[in-house]
Amino acid sequence: EAQVTQNPRYLITVTGKKLTVTCSQNMNHEYMSWYRQDPGLGLRQIYYSMNVEVTDKGDVPEGYKVSRKEKRNFPLILESPSPNQTSLYFCASSLGRWGTEAFFGQGTRLTVV
Amino acid sequence: GENVEQHPSTLSVQEGDSAVIKCTYSDSASNYFPWYKQELGKRPQLIIDIRSNVGEKKDQRIAVTLNKTAKHFSLHITETQPEDSAVYFCWAGGGADGLTFGKGTHLIIQP
């Protein structure tokens, strides 16, 4: 089954403790991206990747890192989480940057206390 | 960069009535306009999309119209049903900035 898988689904952590949210897709998509969803603000892009070893900042990249060592995986790293990073996070993949359907992961609900 | 405005932010309609959500965009180079539906607690999923060489597209009770001159596109849902209750997001893209989301419309279907 074609899918995008994120882990974990829920995470509560403390300020400053490094964490990684994993994202994996099995559709051989070149384009992958991370979004955060906050009430009233919709979906905002954090980082995206056009292909292996090619990443770039989205609209709200501060406080986040990503890597794309393999085509299927695109982890999101928070080196020193802060409470303002409490949010719902989605990973997405598609064949290209635009013009094709984006497939979203199940979402990760992150709470930073 | 691309700027996408989506209205209304909340829309309440009686079951069986029609619902219309409108988005405007700023980048005339944008050529791809998908709509995503997000049910409560779930991931966004594509429901319909349109490209700039087409003015209208229909899929059963859902249709999307595009006015390139005015730079706006709209989602039309007819004969609304309870399962249509969700948040709907428009996207506009294909220009230099890729895809940009609207902020979403919470559609409420009243019984």
Image (cartoon, rainbow, N blue to C red):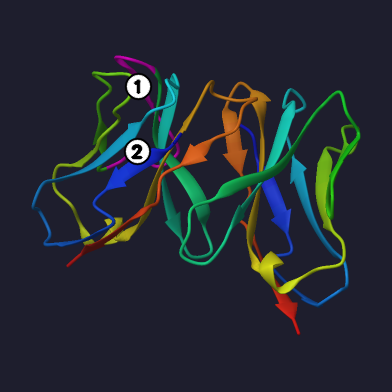
Marks 1 and 2 on same chain: yes
Q: Quadrant of the C terminus of chain B?
A: bottom right
- In the orientation shown, which residue stands out farthest toward the front? A1
Q: Tell me which corner region of the image, top left, top right, bottom left or bottom right, holds residue B46.
A: top right
| Magenta-tinted stretch | A51-62
- Where is residue A75? Give x, y as percent: 25, 34
The chain identifier of the residue carrying mark 2 reads: A
- In the orientation shown, which residue stands out farthest toward the left? A17
- Label 1 and label 2: CA atoms lie apart by 11 Å
- Where is residue A31? Give x, y as percent: 45, 23
The chain identifier of the residue carrying mark 1 reads: A
Report whether A69 appears left or right of B76: left
A58 part of magenta stretch: yes
Compared with B16, B95 (above or below) is above
Give the total of numbered labels. 2
Look at discs 1 and 2 and give the one toward the viewer: 1
Assess disc 1: are there few (<14), some (14-19) or many (≥20) residues with their C-alpha within 10 Å of its C-alpha: some
Circle 2 — which element?
Answer: loop
The residue closer to the viewer here, B34 or A42, is B34
Q: Which residue is mark 1?
A: A55
Q: Quadrant of the N terminus of chain B?
A: top right
Q: What number is the disc on residue B104?
A: none
- Where is residue B56? Give x, y as percent: 90, 38
